[in-house]
Image (cartoon, rainbow, N blue to C red):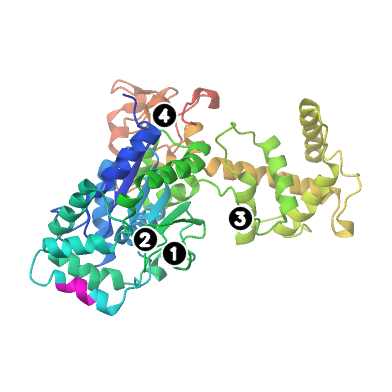
Amino acid sequence: MTAADGTVFFLPGLGFDAAAAAPIADALDSLAGGRLRVVGIDLPGHGGSPDAPNGSVSALADRALQVIEAEADGGPFVIAAHSMGGKVAAVAAHRILNGDANVFGLAALVLLAPSPPTPEPMADDKRAEMLGWAENGLISEEHAIEFVAQNVATPLSDDDERAAIAQVRLMSPLAWRRWLTDGSTEDVSEELGSIDLPVVVLAGEDDDDLGASAQPGLVAELYPRARVVAFPETGHLLPYERPAEVAAEIVRLWDATVSVSPQLTPEWGRLVASDRTAPEARGFLARRLIADDPDYRPRALSAAQLATLRLLADRLVPQPEGRRIDLAARVDDDLASGRGDGWRNAGQPDDASAYRLGLDDLAALWPDDTDEQNAAAEQDALIAGLISGELNDHEALGGDDWNGEMRQHWIDDVRADLTRIWLAHPASLARVGYDGFATSGAATGDAGYVAVAAGQRDPWEPAELGSIASDDDDEYDDDEQDDGRDSPTPNNTRTVEENPAWI
């Protein structure tokens, strides 16, 4: 049996435990043939697991991340979460993308009628009724049956109903009450801000509080890239009511994100997740790994200028078909956010203005031969002319404030920007064999490299970078082993083509 392409971590809703992942796992196995493994997580007080020290969402996220860190293999993963688990997933995702968890590879979220980051909408009488069910101990079978019936649009199969009821009855009364009084009413929206991650939100049209009509307003600020999918004749228990549809949406999102963007091999992913990598560096790498939005709308450039920049990027920084970084979109986002290298040539316009003028010029000069091979040659010749300055005397469209020399300076900046953004991607760092990000974490202190010879590596480095240096090697003498701080230089000397990490 081949290894799975990635992992789906499932966080259940109130009253449910890891077993609630089973219908989705079965549907995924049928649909994706083992491509994705599913790991269900028992949150505190669920499935017989111990209660958390308190009822905060943060305490629940602590447990979720503990399991994710233990079960993650270094490869890409998504978090799927139902109801209460959706609020927990938001906190967990925020920590992962900030580098505050020893895990790497979060690609997307699939949320099933998620509880929002703000206090969950629930009528006072409903909350009081549910609190009463656990007032004197474990929830009775009668109340568990009632809870399940209230949350579905149509009755479940006998097997699914028995499984759901059994999970509710196993729920810790303390955890049940804490969620209703503390977790569900907690507002974590300010802490989380905006999470720029691919997200699909699934909800039933017959779900009163967290259904399809409510979700767009509940998730818009937290997840700007969220897509909401409504299911008719569906209540709140989507893991049991719509497992096949949930599985299909997981596969669809996986194929639209992980399958089309550069990824790290698991060994590299484990290195980023390790204590050798500082949280700040891990956070940067985690955010840079996120797949680009295929529907990205430019913020600093016009749509036509962005399209021209994409053409230019394809010639300057060629990438493999199928797994690409949208370098132009990332440049535009940097321009809109004011991020840059902090300097420009004297007399040169600000970065955003220079890009607009330069791209307008380029669009007017850009060859458009119908023959693909001829077009590529002509485009490369144009770019070479801009770089060399041979086209400085060509009439520019920018007027008196924009001349050929400025255009030459601008194309130099473009080359630097595109290369910098490509190289900043974690998969690119792996491709060129650079693992210097893993020399500043808590596990290493001030230590850097010991082995610096060609074809040799330290034991902690990915195996593809060479053989482990022996104790007999000069680079591995006892004194250098003790502090290892003499050289921050990566030991990889091979060509890009030899490195298999770009997958």
Kind of residue at badge 4: Val
Q: Badge 1 local density, few (<14 within 10 Å), some, or many (20+)?
A: many
Residue 41 higher or lower than 318, as above or below: below
On the rendered structure, is 365 left or right of 345? Answer: right
Pointer 3: what residue?
334
Residue 113: say if magenta: no
In the image, what residue type sits under mark 1? Gln
Q: CA distance from mark 3 to mark 4?
A: 35 Å
Instruction: Identify the residue under disc 2.
Output: 114
Question: Which of the 4 image quadrants contains residue 24?
Answer: top left
Crowding at mark 3 (Cα within 10 Å: few <14, some 14-19, many 20+):
some
Mark-to-mark CA distance, 3 and 1: 30 Å
Q: Tell me if label 2 and label 1 are in contact, CB under 8 Å.
A: yes
Classify residue 27 as left or right of residue 181.
Answer: right
Query: Residue drawn at (20%, 74%), measured in percent from left and top?
Result: 129
Q: Which mark is residue 215?
A: 1
Q: Is residue 10 above or below residue 401?
A: above
Tell me the element at label 2: loop
